[in-house]
Amino acid sequence: MKILVINGPNLNMLGIREPQIYGTQTYADLVAFIKQVGAELSLEAGCFQSNHEGAIVDAIQEARGVYDGIIINPAAYTHTSIAILDALKGAGVPAIEVHLSDPQTREEFRHISYAGMACFKTFAGLGFEGYALALRAFTEMQQLLKHT
Ligand code: DQA
């Protein structure tokens, strides 16, 4: 199984940006963590990060027929981007939303998630662990589908 993990704007600054919210580990640490969990679950996890909305839309479109699932943390675009919502809806690839922090307990403008409307699950407020749970959810989904 192949999963594409997409991280949005400013997540390349992990470890530097607001460590009291996002922790002290870097984006490179996050990629290493995702690859390690992916290997443990015997799945291939591709990682993509961009600060640009259009590049994220392109990555979602290009996932069709290549990846079995998308894990996406659209970062600030979560709360603004109908383009990312539409791309996820049109991709034909199941998606899970992840946030390091829990936007629901933060400022009101973070309470709406457009991308989340096209995702079948959300893990928020669990730091890196949210990505591991999302990878595991895809493995469990595959097991369930095998038995139907
Ligand atoms: C975030 C939450 C967003 O509100 C914020 O804009 C981010 C990161 C998170 O992972 O907690 O950049 O998606």
Image (cartoon, rainbow, N blue to C red):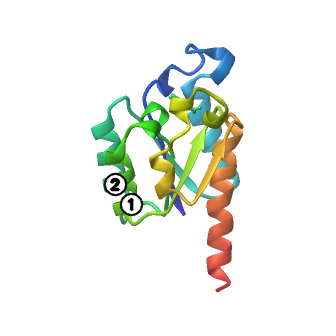
Q: State the residue position of label 1.
A: 89
Q: Residue at x 45, y 47 (%)?
A: 114
Q: Residue at x 28, y 39 (%)?
A: 54
Q: Is residue 24 visible?
A: no
Please say if 56 is above or below 23: below
Where on the picture, by quarter, is residue 80?
top left
Hey, which residue is sitting farthest front in the picture? 108
**124 to the left or right of 61:** right
Contact? badges 1 and 2 (CB < 8 Å): yes
| Three-letter residue code for mark 1 | Lys
Bin the neighbour count of mark 2 within 10 Å (Cα to Cα): few under 14, some 14-19, many 20 and up: some
Where on the picture, by quarter, is residue 25?
top right
CA distance for labels 1 and 2: 5 Å
| Three-letter residue code for mark 2 | Asp
Q: Position of residue 130 (x, y in %)?
A: 67, 43
Q: State the residue position of label 2.
A: 86
Q: Position of residue 96 (x, y in %)?
A: 55, 54
Which quadrant of the figure contains the N terminus? bottom right
Bin the neighbour count of mark 1 within 10 Å (Cα to Cα): few under 14, some 14-19, many 20 and up: some
Secondary structure under the numbered disc 1 in the rendered image: helix
- Given residues 19 and 2, the one toward you in this image is 19
Where on the picture, by quarter, is residue 146?
bottom right
State yes or no: Cβ of the residue under disc 2 lies below 8 Å from any atom of ligand 1: no
Indicate the quadrant of ligand 1 in the picture.
top right
